[in-house]
Amino acid sequence: MGIPGLLAISRFSYAAGASGTVTVPSGAVVVRVMTLSVGGGSFTIAPGGPNQVAGPVAGSSVPLPAGTWWTAEWAPGLSPLGGGTQFVFTTTDSYYVEYATAKVG
């Protein structure tokens, strides 16, 4: 018996790099995002998935002060960011986006 509201997870995966765009695969939910910019940068999030009313529409740019990490994480069944979510990391030195897919059956 699982914890109500949490997904049974069959697989974790991730995308990582320096700067660029990440699109979360269909059927996945975001569980962790981390990014670092040594000289100062920014990122945007265009939420997608079943918890969203419309398709991905980018929010305001999130500034990253020089030399700082930004991180957020959610339990898999509580993540507001699903498949189709897009992250755009600009002038960042490192990013990591971890996502999970639910167990089928």
Image (tube, rainbow, N blue to C red):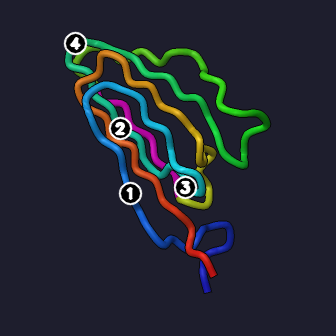
What residue occupies the far right of the structure in this picture?
A: 53
Instruction: Tell me the residue that label 2 is attached to.
Output: 34
Identify the mark at residue 39; answer none if there is no mark. 4
| First reached walking from the N terminus: tag 2 or tag 3 | 3
Residue 48 drawn in magenta: no
Q: Position of residue 46 (x, y in %)?
A: 59, 29
Q: Nearer the viewer, mark 2 or mark 3?
A: 3
Identify the mark at residue 13; answer none if there is no mark. 1
Which residue is rendered at x = 66% and y = 25% of the image?
Answer: 57
Identify the mark at residue 37; answer none if there is no mark. none
Q: Which residues are magenta?
A: 69-75
User: Quick one: label 2, few (<14), some, or many (20+) residues within 10 Å?
Assistant: some
Residues under labels 1 and 2: Cα distance? Answer: 14 Å
Q: Position of residue 104 (x, y in %)?
A: 60, 76
| First reached walking from the N terminus: tag 4 or tag 1 | 1
Q: Amino acid at mark 3?
A: Ala
Instruction: Tell me the residue that label 3 is attached to.
Output: 28
| First reached walking from the N terminus: tag 3 or tag 4 | 3
Which residue is rendered at x = 41% and y = 62% of the image?
Answer: 12
Q: Amino acid at mark 4?
A: Gly
The residue closer to the viewer here, 86 or 66, is: 86
Circle 3 — which element?
A: strand
Q: Are marks 3 and 4 in contact (CB under 8 Å)?
A: no
Quadrant location of the N terminus? bottom right
